[in-house]
Image (cartoon, grey):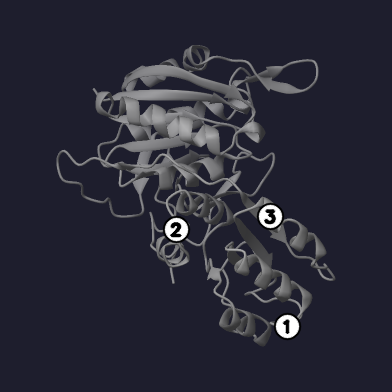
Amino acid sequence: MRRILMLATGGTIASRESGQGLSPAITSEEILSYAPRLGELCRVEAVQLMNLDSTNIGPGHWLEMAAAIERNYGAYDGFVITHGTDTMAYTAAALSYLIQDSPKPIVITGSQKSICLDDTDARRNLYDSFLYAADGDSHEVSLVFDGRVILGTRARKERSKSYNAFSSVDYPEAAVIRDGRLIRYLACRHYEEGAVPAFYHRLEDRVLLLTLIPGMGAEGLRLLKDSYQALILQSFGVGGLPGGDSGPLAQAIGEWLEAGRTIVMMTQVPYEGSDMSVYQVGQQVKEKFQLIETYNMTLEAAAAKLMWVLGRTDRPEEIRDLFYRPVQHDLIR
């Protein structure tokens, strides 16, 4: 029987009413006590890594999760991380970059209601996650939620309350779980016996996201230049910049680049990605400046990958090369 380690980090699945709203308070052992059927699937052990609302989880916690998996990698056949839903897609993406080419599954799950409630989705999500993690053909980082298995770089939370909260953006779901049966949609990758993943240990978190709205000026962008190493600029449609390559925003972008900063352009449209070459307001900007374009990457993947890339190098050509190098189907051009 396969050995699976559960890393508990908090979130709604572990929450109780505090008198001031829900707050994580249920321990890893208590979570497992609500799901006794897991023992039919695998041998389960648990570690309480942290107990946080996922709103409070960030790059330092991603590194802590990756380090816990690295420490325990040789002793277990797979890992399940229980996590709050609000930043779960960011964590899934971050772990996809921090732990690459893992022959063992790393599964992230949670719930929209606490596991201690009668009408919760937590017990199903937890069971499905261990079912997937205990299968010998499961690999790498995935998010399992509401019967869907989504690649770690392709997940996005799209509903704030419904049980079907997560979608796989611009890429097929890897599998579904129906009535306790795992049905795979994507072919499994083959790993040689004894293969080990690549673990990474640094992230640069000084990354700013700015979403454009019509009429937005450039002064705020100029003022933030000295506080960040990189900017993700979410523009409209397939990608463009108000004023093209000569407007105030373009001038501010030029100042960022002259200061050695990295600029990443993406669309704020959820599906189908960007293509800055389509319209003049995008093509002019892309030809004038050394920008990185995300194409059909999710925001979560783009942000986490940029932090991972900047944690490895500050050389512009190496940044571009690493960013455009696909990891777990995060980028399709």
Query: What residue did someone put label 1 on?
Result: 246
| Closer to viewer: mark 2 or mark 3 | 3
Q: Name the one closer to the observer, 47 or 159.
A: 47
Vertical side of 209 occupied by 249: above or below: below
Give percent across and percent down for residue 246: 73, 83
Tell me the kind of residue under disc 2: Asp
Tell me the kind of residue under disc 3: Asp
Identify which residue is drawn at 34% across, 31% down: 70
Q: Residues within 10 Å of mark 1 (few under 14, many from 20)?
A: some
Q: Which mark is residue 149?
A: none
Query: What residue did someone put label 2 on?
Result: 330
Give percent across and percent down for residue 136: 25, 37
Is 6 left or right of 186, judged from the image as shown? right
Quarter of the figure with the N terminus: top left
Identify the element where label 2 is drawn. Answer: loop
Query: What residue did someone put label 3 on?
Result: 226
Vertical side of 134 occupied by 302: above or below: below
Specify the farthest residue to the left. 193
Q: Name the one closer to the observer, 301 or 134.
A: 301
How many marks overall?
Answer: 3
Q: Earlier in the sequence, mark 2 or mark 3?
A: 3
Identify the element where label 3 is drawn. Answer: helix
